[in-house]
Amino acid sequence: MDHFHYRDGVLHVEDVSLEALAAEVGTPFYCYATAALIRNYEAFRSAVPQGSLIAYSVKANDNLAVLKTLRKLGAGADVVSGGELKKALAAGIAPERIVFSGVGKSRAEIQFALACGILQFNVESEPELDVIGEVAIALDRRAAIAIRVNPDVDAGTHAKINTGTAETKFGVPWRKACEVYARASSLPGIEPRGLAVHIGSQITELAPFEAAFAQLAELVQTLRAQGHSVERLDLGGGLGVPYAADVQAPPTPATYGALVARLLGGLGANFVFEPGRLIAADAGVLVTRVLYVKEGESKTFLVLDAGMNDLLRPALYDARHEILLVRAPPEGIGHKIYDVVGPVCETADLFARELSLPKARPDDLLAIMTAGAYGAVMASSYNARPPAAEVLVKGEEWGVVRQRQTPEALMALERLPHWLK
């Protein structure tokens, strides 16, 4: 995260002090570095076959400013809901550069996507295929689709983000792929364009990709031998990022791109990729303030003003994030072991267990690193806590790109039934 660095003893994002931002914006807040978004996107784009569509996975970070930054670099979008589709369009992403994934597309969402003219639907099941065909016929359209296949490959990642095994809800079973593709070719409202595969997220080795892509190459050849056109391959995303210095470093985009070229480059297909975490994760941090240093019976707790409603990953996935003091501690201050927790009324509201940090005091600012993906997008107002604000930095400039809601604004969405008025 070289766009996050100490200058004069204070952690900066590009050329902006996080300490100064905290004074202006209040805590907690997310802060994103434009330079890191650009670096990560360009590193991936240059690693994969020329002409590929980089359809950024909107679910990783759906802030309009982030989406527009990536759109200006040439990114398309991978969306999994009608709401994400509307956000991608609002950011200026052309519909013909948008793919619609997800197992539960509603008729209304399908109708809207067809009317917009998106590139393709990634079809996850036969019932979904039927509904897309029916909606397309009603609109006098033909829906471009790719069949998402489930290769039954274990990505070796956390069970809750492992999507390529037979036990998960995603994709058409591998052994039925030819049958479903042939059926899609026979439907009047459907135009099969290719295949899609996505085996999971935060994958830290190449072997699962190699197994899935080898199967995909074999399936392409089988379908073509049966007389089907397979012109587009959506390879999903899933390449991991290093959340901490002491964990296995994931493959680089360059080694991943070389694998794609070796296994699939000779098929003459057009490629779609759906990176999300790889682009956004290390472009963002969550800045929070120490409320209390609590001495427990057997532990010392750092109680922060950010909670699991702001950053759910540690509670949901047992995820680890590096945590830094925004102001570098004086030399010789010594370290202490803390459980770093939030104010939410749940034991699961825990950011780090038994973490060694320089001795902290109330009002110290901390930065929870590599929080740009699956952070703000998963936030909630649990405990009636307004989620953290979001800030985007570019060089010396910064702007609030999502305001912190107020309790009053949250309550304004609620309505009392007539018998309680």
Image (tube, rainbow, N blue to C red):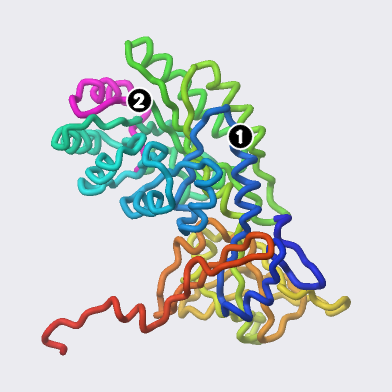
The residue segment tinted magenta is 169-192
* 112 over 189 or under it: above or below: below
- Of the two numbered discs 1 and 2 on the same chain, state the one appearing first in sequence: 2
Residue that badge 2 annotates:
193
Horizontal side, residue 80 vs residue 317: left or right: left
- Residue 140 appears at what percent x and percent y? 16, 32
> Residue placed farthest to the right in the image?
332
Task: Answer with the quarter of the image where residue 190 lies.
Answer: top left
**Does the segment drawn in magenta span residue 82?**
no
* 162 over 365 or under it: above or below: above
Looking at numbered disc 1 in the image, what kind of residue is underneath it? Leu
Q: Quadrant of the C terminus?
A: bottom left
Number of numbered discs on residues: 2
Label 1, label 2: how many angstroms apart (C-alpha)? 27 Å
**Residue at 52% from the left image edge and 50% from the top image edge:** 158
Looking at numbered disc 2 in the image, what kind of residue is underneath it? Arg
Horizontal side, residue 201 vs residue 294: left or right: left
Q: What element carries label 1?
A: loop
Residue that badge 1 annotates:
206
275, 392: nearer the viewer: 392
Q: In which quarter of the image is the N terminus?
A: bottom right
**Residue at 72% from the left image edge and 73% from the top image edge:** 325
Q: Is mark 2 on a helix, strand or loop?
A: strand
Task: Answer with the quarter of the image where residue 319 lies.
Answer: bottom right
Classify mark 2: residues with Cα within 10 Å, few (<14), some (14-19) or many (20+).
many
